[in-house]
Image: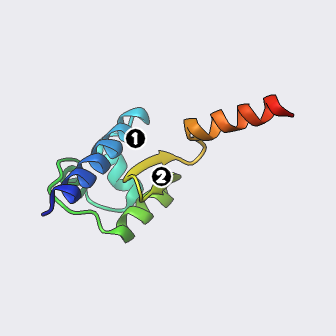
Amino acid sequence: MKIEKIKLFSKIASELIKYRIDHNLSQADLAKKLGVSQNQVSKWERGMNDFKIGTLVEICKKLGLKLEVNLGVIKEENEKEESQMFEERQAEKIT
């Protein structure tokens, strides 16, 4: 596996763990929510299984997340990028 791909899957795994912990979910809870086995969630979190793009899209849909493919980052849909917020504040100052 290429280094970039390993880094991407590691980042996705970290974000999945963060989401699970932030929402007080066990691996079993998350697995149920996603319609997969707890073993599958465990493998994803440990980086033992690749994420197919279709799988990532489904995970994001089910969890109410958006996938930023160019960065390999998963974020909650209602979050705004800091740069976007900065630009909006600057635009408000101008008007």
Q: Quadrant of the C terminus?
A: top right
User: Who is closer to the viewer here, 9 or 91?
Assistant: 91
Confirm or deny contact between disc 2 and disc 1 (CB under 8 A).
yes
Give the percent coordinates (x, y) of residue 69.
42, 59
Q: Is residue 13 above or below residue 52?
A: above
Residue 88 seen in the figure: yes
User: Which class describes the residues within 10 Å of circle 1: few (<14), some (14-19), or many (20+)?
Assistant: some
Give the percent coordinates (x, y) of residue 53.
36, 68
Q: Which residue is mark 2?
A: 63
Q: Secondary structure at mark 1?
A: helix
The kind of residue on which mark 2 rests is: Leu
Which numbered dot is residue 67?
A: none
Q: Is residue 95 left or right of residue 52?
A: right
In percent of the image, x 44 and y 36: which residue is there? Answer: 23
Q: How many marks?
A: 2
Q: Is residue 37 above or below residue 11?
A: below
Residue 41 seen in the figure: no
In percent of the image, x 25 and y 54: which residue is there? Answer: 9
Give the percent coordinates (x, y) of residue 60.
46, 57
Q: Is residue 93 above or below residue 39?
A: above
Which numbered dot is residue 19?
A: 1
Q: Secondary structure at mark 2?
A: helix
The kind of residue on which mark 1 rests is: Tyr
